[in-house]
């Protein structure tokens, strides 16, 4: 079979507002259609059932927002990154804006940490929250195989809490490598009934050195 | 919209994407600049409503008016409804988030009888009094249209204006009238009186009904001399020029028909006697392959969908089908777009082109013989014989298809047990046909027999005929089950109790509004959904409201009886329908409109087929 030259384009985008109610499967479908609308020279797999080569870095869970999100898409020819970003942004829903595109400098698997801002409606003070997270942080952690009480503190790289309107804003950086991924919902789960409502926004995807995953 | 409170409840419900709006392609207008604001309400879930082409077409027509903003609204699922009621959040439109209660006009599309409770519930959830008579000038005008509006009577007490027929231009005319009357500060009563004079508009409150001692309708008269006694449906004469939306909202969540839809033509030449669409959508009007191809290209550019579905009644009767498919294939293959066709008449041409056009992933084909014996197929005027059915199946098998789906109906007029057994015999013959030739090893055949219950619909030759009783339908369903002896045939059948309720509302009159209101009060919603349908609840509702449902569903109406929908003129004449009803019993067929015109009533009303073909 004829070899096809292809390039990977990294797309930096956001998933916010109403888009947070979109599951990953629905997000994939939405992004796929936006890519088609954008007019980018898309690469399709060559099989019986052609599809795009689209890889999401670390999809946020439904109900979580991301101000910093990444997907890689394979294309057939090199394009101007600014023009690609503009075309793609026009094709995306308004709550899924594209910030920029670039040819990747790092691999997606270099991902080590993700930073979040968790806004929590609570009576707890920022100091009380930081105090709670200073020792062991045991939650009932679910994985595909099992469900067990686990101390998640080794996966919490950093956690600070500050005053916010009607509650507290927890700024935290959590482990996000393929082997040691911690979903930010465990942070609010740990606070249990002290939190009446919370919303989570991811603010960065970082490599092992704490640098952005460019 | 109270965004903060809605945020809280969205975290608690299934599929929150149904309730947020904000999709790509959503139309936002400056509400301060609008003269008229309209909420287009679909009385079923978002996934179903967003799949509806008719709604998209009408919303485009309305939103093309620079002074009007028409927004979307769907029935909330019961989990969302509970949260909304608990938090005191009224029904809101998706685009602006504004309460439906505050719109000028609230429009409902009536696609299915079992959505009626949802319509009333949506009014209730908006804080709008459900009965038209209880809504003063401070409330929105509530309008409705769609296929079920051809018998508007069961909903007559709830709706201010019905739009009968195709609404593309009629709704715009109604909106213009509303705008003028609003500017002039005229009352609702004045508006309704004027609206009744627009062609296709039916204002039920302007008519008086009386009933005889036997329960039948004794008279149906306009209350005023200037209100038309008959409401003529509106329809487009020309489709190529008609407004068609080539861009629309792109749902975040998966909808039922998540693909591009091309409307190929309207109407049907066939005249199957059970089919309401085949009668009310007359005359046949085709779009040209050129226009359709251009619309498909624009749709693709604006949506990014990878599938085009062609939509019409009896698609194989489209005269430009080969040309259209060739035109589409010239670019869709390169773009990795699949084509899909609706169920076909089994006799239809099934060539290489057709095969090419079918979705590669789709191994099945659907045909609709409708009845198991030739005698009964003649009764329903299906105009297809067993030889043609077998030829169609053989062609499908020879091209490697191994799964066939066949649609049938139970409860057809004059049906005997032999006709029921005939379904099993026919399905078995098709299985045998597959094995009569050497086939690819390891590939068995699967014939799915799907049997629904006839619901006699207004404006069909069967409209006078009482539906088989529920027990009789059940007996027939079991009889067929016993006749099927191979596992190569999969047998599905519809719930006869659901069909019974459909028949009640399809053939019902104004007195049924009591039952609908009571049902909503008792919490009935989404009656078309298995998880909510409750026959026992409905039996209690009918009993509590003093309604005998069998009077509407199972009773045969006399040809001379005043029918609840007799004031609606769908174009096809009553004389023609009576003639067809009599021919059905006599087992006589009527040729299709291209072969010979049968003078259905449309011959002088814009049908072009009769001029080309037969004599009147």
Image (cartoon, helix red, strand yellow):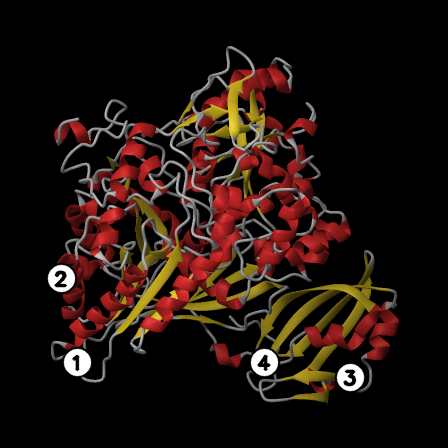
In front of the other: B134 or A40: B134
Mark carried by residue B597 = none
The residue located at (66%, 44%) in the rendering is: B91
SS state under label 2: helix
| Same-chain check, marks 4 and 3 | yes
Cα distance, mark 1 to mark 3? 61 Å
Q: Are marks 2 and 3 in contact (CB under 8 Å)?
A: no
Cα distance, mark 4 to mark 2? 63 Å
SS state under label 1: loop
Q: Position of residue B141 (x, y in %)?
A: 60, 28
Q: Position of residue A87 (x, y in %)?
A: 41, 52
Chain at numbered mark 1 = B
Q: Are marks 4 and 3 in contact (CB under 8 Å)?
A: no
- Dot 2, crowdedness within 10 Å: few (<14), some or many (≥20)? some
* For discs 4 and 2, the disc positioned in front in the rendered view: 2
In the picture of the structure, the residue carrying the numbered disc 1 is B440
In front of the other: B173 or A145: B173
Chain at numbered mark 2 = B
In front of the other: B36 or B32: B36
Mark carried by residue A112 = 4
Q: Position of residue A9 (x, y in %)?
A: 40, 66
In the picture of the structure, the residue carrying the numbered disc 2 is B391
Q: Position of residue B302 (x, y in %)?
A: 38, 47
SS state under label 3: loop
* For discs 2 and 1, the disc positioned in front in the rendered view: 2
- Depicted A75 relative to depicted B432: above or below: above
In the picture of the structure, the residue carrying the numbered disc 3 is A137
**Residue found at the very far front of the displayed protein:** B213
To which quarter of the image does residue B583 belong? top left
């Amino acid at each position: 079979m004829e070899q096809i030259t292809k390039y990977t384009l990294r797309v930096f985008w956001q998933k916010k507002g109403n888009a947070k109610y979109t599951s990953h499967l629905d997000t994939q479908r939405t992004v796929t259609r936006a890519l088609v609308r954008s007019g980018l020279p898309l690469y399709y797999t060559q099989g019986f059932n052609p599809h795009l080569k689209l890889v999401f870095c670390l999809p946020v869970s439904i109900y979580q927002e991301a101000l910093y999100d990444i997907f890689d898409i394979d294309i057939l020819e090199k394009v101007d990154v600014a023009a690609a970003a503009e075309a793609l942004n026009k094709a995306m829903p308004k709550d899924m804006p594209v910030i920029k595109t670039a040819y990747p400098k790092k691999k997606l698997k270099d991902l080590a940490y993700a930073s979040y801002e968790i806004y929590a409606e609570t009576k707890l003070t920022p100091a009380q929250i930081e105090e709670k997270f200073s020792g062991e942080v045991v939650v009932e952690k679910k994985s595909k195989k099992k469900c067990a009480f686990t101390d998640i503190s080794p996966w919490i790289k950093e956690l600070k809490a500050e005053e916010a309107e009607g509650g507290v804003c927890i700024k935290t950086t959590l482990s996000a490598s393929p082997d040691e991924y911690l979903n930010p919902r465990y942070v609010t789960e740990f606070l249990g009934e002290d939190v009446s409502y919370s919303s989570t926004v991811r603010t960065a995807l970082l490599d092992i050195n704490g640098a952005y995953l460019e | 919209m109270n965004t903060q409170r809605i945020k809280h409840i969205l975290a608690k419900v299934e599929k929150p994407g149904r309730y947020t709006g904000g999709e790509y392609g959503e139309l936002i207008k400056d509400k301060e600049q609008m003269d008229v604001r309209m909420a287009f309400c679909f009385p079923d879930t978002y996934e179903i409503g967003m799949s509806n082409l008719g709604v998209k077409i009408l919303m485009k027509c309305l939103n093309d008016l620079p002074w009007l903003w028409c927004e979307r609204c769907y029935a909330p699922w019961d989990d969302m409804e509970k949260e909304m009621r608990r938090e005191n959040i009224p029904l809101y439109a998706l685009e602006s988030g504004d309460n439906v209660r505050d719109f000028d006009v609230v429009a409902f599309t009536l696609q299915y009888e079992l959505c009626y409770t949802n319509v009333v519930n949506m009014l209730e959830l908006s804080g709008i009094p459900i009965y038209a008579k209880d809504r003063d000038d401070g409330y929105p005008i509530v309008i409705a249209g769609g296929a079920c509006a051809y018998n508007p009577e069961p909903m007559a007490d709830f709706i201010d204006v019905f739009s009968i027929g195709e609404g593309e231009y009629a709704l715009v005319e109604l909106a213009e009238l509303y705008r003028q009357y609003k500017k002039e500060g005229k009352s609702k009563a004045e508006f309704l009186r004027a609206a009744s004079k627009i062609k296709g508009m039916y204002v039920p409150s302007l008519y008086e009904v009386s009933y005889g001692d036997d329960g039948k309708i004794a008279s149906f008269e306009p209350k005023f001399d200037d209100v038309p006694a008959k409401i003529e449906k509106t329809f487009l004469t020309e489709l190529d020029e008609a407004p068609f939306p080539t861009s629309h909202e792109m749902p975040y969540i998966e909808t039922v028909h998540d693909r591009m839809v091309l409307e190929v033509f309207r109407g049907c030449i066939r005249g199957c006697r059970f089919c309401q669409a085949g009668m009310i959508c007359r005359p046949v009007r085709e779009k040209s392959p050129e226009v359709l191809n251009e619309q498909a290209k624009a749709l693709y550019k604006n949506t990014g969908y990878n599938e085009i579905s062609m939509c019409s009644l009896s698609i194989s009767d489209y005269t430009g089908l080969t040309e259209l498919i060739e035109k589409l294939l010239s670019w869709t293959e390169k773009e990795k777009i699949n084509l899909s066709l609706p169920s076909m008449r089994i006799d239809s041409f099934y060539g290489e082109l057709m095969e090419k056009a079918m979705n590669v992933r789709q191994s099945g084909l659907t045909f609709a013989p409708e009845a198991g014996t030739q005698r009964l197929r003649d009764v329903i005027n299906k105009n297809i014989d067993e030889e043609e059915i077998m030829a169609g199946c053989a062609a499908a098998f020879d091209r490697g298809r191994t799964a066939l789906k066949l649609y049938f109906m139970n409860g057809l007029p004059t049906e005997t047990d032999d006709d029921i057994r005939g379904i099993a015999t026919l399905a078995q013959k098709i299985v045998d046909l597959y094995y009569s030739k050497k086939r690819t090893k390891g590939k068995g055949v699967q014939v799915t027999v799907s049997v629904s219950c006839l619901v006699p619909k207004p404006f069909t030759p069967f409209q006078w005929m009482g539906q088989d009783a529920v027990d009789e339908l059940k007996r027939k369903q079991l009889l067929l089950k016993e006749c099927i002896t191979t596992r190569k045939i999969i047998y599905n059948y519809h719930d006869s109790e659901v069909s019974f309720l459909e028949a009640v509302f399809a053939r019902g009159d104004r007195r049924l509004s009591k039952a609908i209101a009571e049902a909503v009060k008792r919490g009935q919603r989404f009656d078309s959904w298995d998880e909510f349908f409750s026959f026992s609840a409905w039996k209690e509702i009918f009993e509590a409201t003093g309604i005998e449902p069998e009077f509407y569903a199972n009773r045969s109406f006399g040809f001379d009886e005043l029918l609840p929908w007799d004031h609606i003129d769908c174009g096809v004449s009553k004389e023609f329908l009576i003639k067809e009803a009599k021919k059905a019993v006599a087992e006589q067929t009527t040729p299709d409109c291209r072969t010979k015109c049968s003078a259905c009533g449309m011959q002088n009303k814009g049908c072009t087929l009769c001029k080309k073909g037969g004599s009147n």
